[in-house]
Amino acid sequence: MNLPKKVHIVEMCPRDGFQGEKTMIPTEKKIQFINMLSRTGLNDIQATSLVHPKAIPQLADGDEVLAKIDRPAGVQWKVLVPNLRGLERSFPYKPDKINLMMSVSESHSRANANKSVDEALKGHAEVAKAALDAGIGVIGQMSCFFGCPFEGEVPWSQRERIIRAYLDMGVQELGLADTIGVANPRQTYALVSLVMDMFPGIPFSLHMHNTRDMALANILAAMQAGATAFDSAVGGLGGCPYVPNATGNIATEDLVNMLHEMGIETGVDLDKVIEAARFAQTLIDHPLAEMMVRAGKRTDLKPAPKEQHKVG
Amino acid sequence: MNLPKKVHIVEMCPRDGFQGEKTMIPTEKKIQFINMLSRTGLNDIQATSLVHPKAIPQLADGDEVLAKIDRPAGVQWKVLVPNLRGLERSFPYKPDKINLMMSVSESHSRANANKSVDEALKGHAEVAKAALDAGIGVIGQMSCFFGCPFEGEVPWSQRERIIRAYLDMGVQELGLADTIGVANPRQTYALVSLVMDMFPGIPFSLHMHNTRDMALANILAAMQAGATAFDSAVGGLGGCPYVPNATGNIATEDLVNMLHEMGIETGVDLDKVIEAARFAQTLIDHPLAEMMVRAGKRTDLKPAPKEQHKVG
């Protein structure tokens, strides 16, 4: 198997994981959680989204979170900004990069952001310019890249058009998101290969939701095609609140476990991530969507039972 | 990606799925469920285990289940038998094949069957001879093939010794089980390749538990190494009741969905399997360990919302 030696992980829980949670998480708990994350070896964290407070009440405390989290050396901080107002709000906190995000499907773009694809691109171009002028890196993420809940898979030409528009506005990295967890490994391999062939040298991260349990298989296929960066969320939290049933980023601890078991480096301390997931469990009102907290590591060997079971 | 055109699925829910369930499932409900399964296109079903009734009370009705299920044309029926007594009980129901099962690890063999590996092999040799004499096919399954909860991964020499002993006693097919869900894709690719190299032409099925969410990734890796047969259980039920936290066969519906999405044929009707999973949910006292019932198929497109969400 053709696999990378090292993989880069982008931690999404504080933004994509939390944004759809119905129980309001106290700001100081978010800060405590993010401070745990930034000491796990996860060195690339999307801390929040600076959207209008009414749009996503759970993230209405984004400014306070950004102002108060620890900023240990070597950790890169990202903030999702929907517009110029959000970008300007981010300036005092000096994020390393901002994430732009739009859907590649017209109907999902309208449902999620109340904008056509062209309107979203026009707005993003202004934000990208202002961010680059301010010395902040810009990532262009595309939701529904592998399929849309309303339209199915959108034509490649539409996705290519958006990538080119992103690159034209100065975006330095791409994000390819399987927002609703419909990607399959053959498709993932093909699309990663296509993006790498058509846009050589452009860094990208894959954002695979585990809605149909295929995220780790998709990540395996993507690595075989050459991908080396993946988004994930501690606890497997998240999913777009405006997409039916779109629950669950791939859990960081499940991803890190698979990669480490395969001998692929991440720089992340799995035990500390599992500890962070246990803490995340105390903040939400439903079970985590992950396996490692429940199952434990392979290397956590059990003592053999002293009393033998008799199966007769 | 080097992938097969068609994959064979062995349905395990009526035995491996149900055996650890604490709520006793009425016999007539099991029969109704199995009759649903045998009309989904699943053509290879392990119907029950003829163990001592006290060993696994949930399967104490194995004889009645075998006597009363429909036997539609084209479906192969398997029964797990632990010993000669179990084999003899199976004769009236004319199973196509029996499954022998033992652990490749000494400590797990003792914990699970109260037998050393050599004692298990000796007993299995007698059962295999009697089954073959009666014209019944014999499958030799190995639990903890990818790792043991007490010992970790056992030496390859131990696994090779058991495979050779199985083949010496006339076993026609092998089963390689990741009983506790510790296999990773690189290991799976390597072990499948090794088994196929050392025992060319011997059919085998992989039995991957989803305990750490790696089952579909492991199945993808196994297919790339040449594997074409996989065990699964509707609803993702199952797991060895004597292994801590060993919950969850890979769900048949999640496996079939991935394979079909990749263009790999199974002969199985996914809608009917999802319907069977919904019925299985009514028989147990906890949520299913699967995704397709919750998420629905990719092709179940939703109407775009009429009222647009305003993210501001």
Image: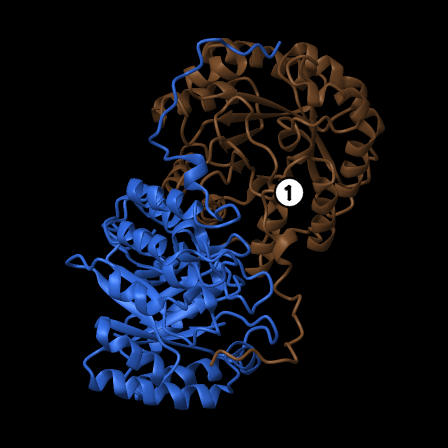
Chain colours: A blue, B brown
- Image position, residue A213 (x, y; %): 52, 52
- Image position, residue A123 (x, y; %): 39, 88
The picture quadrant where one finds residue B183 is: top left
Residue at the spot 40% in from the left edge and 48% down from the top edge: A280
Near-viewer residue (B236 or A90): A90
B253 to B106, vertically: above or below? below
A68 to A202, vertically: above or below? above
Near-viewer residue (A140 or B172): A140
Residue at the spot 31% in from the left edge and 62% down from the top edge: A229
Give SS at disc 1.
helix
Does A127 sit left or right of B5 as displayed? Answer: left
Does B33 sit left or right of B116 as displayed? Answer: right
Does B39 sit left or right of A250 as displayed? Answer: right
Q: Is residue A248 visible?
A: yes
- Could you tell me which chain the residue with mark 1 belongs to? B
- Image position, residue A58 (x, y; %): 45, 64
Residue at the spot 53% in from the left edge and 9% down from the top edge: B122
Q: What residue is disc 1 on?
A: B235
Total marks in image: 1
- Image position, residue B185 (x, y; %): 40, 45
Residue at the spot 25% in from the left edge and 48% down from the top edge: A40
